[in-house]
Amino acid sequence: MRILFVSPRQCWPAVSGAKLRDYHFARGLSARSELTYVYFADPGKASPYLPLHAEVIPVPKPRMYTPMKVLRGVVGRLPLPLVNYTSPAMTSALRALVKARKFDLVHFDSIHMMPYEHLFGGTPVIYNWHNIESELMRRYAETAPLSRRAVASVTARKIEAAERYILRSAFGHVVCSGRERDALAAIASGARVTVVHNGVDLSGFARGSAEGRRFRLVFVGSMNYHANSDAGLWFAREVWPAVRERHPEWRLTLVGSNPPPAVVALREQLGIEVTGTVTDVKPYYREALAAIVPLRTGGGTRLKILEAMAASVPVVSTELGAEGLPVISGENLLLVKNRTQWLEALEAVTGDAEVRSGLIRAARATVAAFDWEVLGQSLFETYRGWLLL
């Protein structure tokens, strides 16, 4: 099978959820097919070596939020998040590839690549949905500053229109959870949609799971993503002071790239550490009493929960934070709704050895089905089966 994989991001180093899913899907497909991987390379950096068994073609990432693109996003048909990824250089690269060879299918790694769909004629185009982007934008509009809510609401409606279009036009779709599959089926019952979950490197995290001195509450996530920065700020301001009063020896560690100034400023609070970009999250899990996921907005399924489970760290999360995952509160993690429940849950996972060990055992059993190697095979078999229809 000859596959063209088109990505809006540079997936390596794989330091975010989107990059991990991107990289492991490309890796799984490249091990089983002839893969051409075309991606937007980060500006100002030499294109890195990507550890893929594939032909790798970098394209310079276009400038985002230029005045012309903002105007097009406001008055045009396409929403700004898609307009941002329009690029003459990408159009030229894809046209050259299509002219030079025949592909069995095209994998678009997110709906942001929709502006290029018209280049492929009768070749099957499949979208990998990291989130339902219109849902994510609507949720952002609910918590955004008042000055941004109207624009976010309009953008959400335009994204929804784009989603409806590709559900009709594309050959197939891959989503992260059954919840998202059902949501898309409600929009377009005839669309071909399958679930390939987010995953985790089970062997890598198992090597770092030994018990040691644990004193951290760890929150992992790219901090330039609004949902993560909002969650970190809320927890630090609303929950952490009461936690620290009870446990002055504990540390709250926010692990993630590109923290905005408001998150960086949390370092001034006692007991809070903001790491910025790290090369490996495993050392932080080795010192973690618990992994917290205090998300109040966002979408998709969270790799941070799967990683914590694989690292034998109990997870405390909001219901939205664990959305789309096969979890049961009190069995393989604890779900909370308010400040009081946060305190109660953290006391339970840190003060009751039986509760802690039970959560860890159940979480490890849950995450066993989410190994990236297994998921890569599943994605390939799905594509091969679809082409035989």
Image (spheres, rainbow, N blue to C red):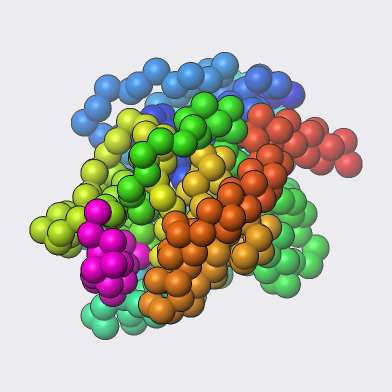
Whole-percent x and y of residue 262? 17, 62
Q: Which of 268 and 353 is in front in this view?
A: 353
Horizontal side, residue 196 vs residue 304: left or right: right
Q: Which residue lies furthest to the left in this view?
A: 268
Q: Which x, y percent locates residue 241?
A: 24, 70
Q: In which quarter of the image is the N terminus?
A: top right
Q: Which residue sits at x=27%, y=72%?
A: 242
**141 on left or right of 349:** left
Helix, strand or loop: magenta stretch:
helix
Residue 385 is situated, as x and y percent measured from the top left of the image, at 84, 37
Q: Which residue occupies the extreme right position in the image?
A: 389
Where does the image place residue 320, in percent across and percent down from the top left? 52, 69
Q: Nearer the viewer, residue 289 or 61?
A: 289
Left or right: 162 as drawn, with respect to 175: left
**Residue at 35% across, 21% down:** 48
Using the image as rendered, state which of residue 229 and residue 135 is in the foreground: 229
- Residue at image position (31%, 71%) is 239
Stretch of the chain drawn in magenta: 230-249
Q: Does the magenta stretch include residue 263?
A: no
In the picture, which quadrant includes the C terminus? top right
Compared to residue 311, the image places residue 48 above or below, namely: above
Looking at the picture, does residue 370 appear above or below residue 35?
A: below
Q: Residue at x 44, y 57 (%)?
A: 350
* Corner quadrant of residue 191: bottom right
On screen, residue 157 above or below 324: below
The reply to whether the magenta stretch includes residue 232 is yes
Residue 317 appears in the rendering: no
Q: Quadrant of residue 124?
A: top right
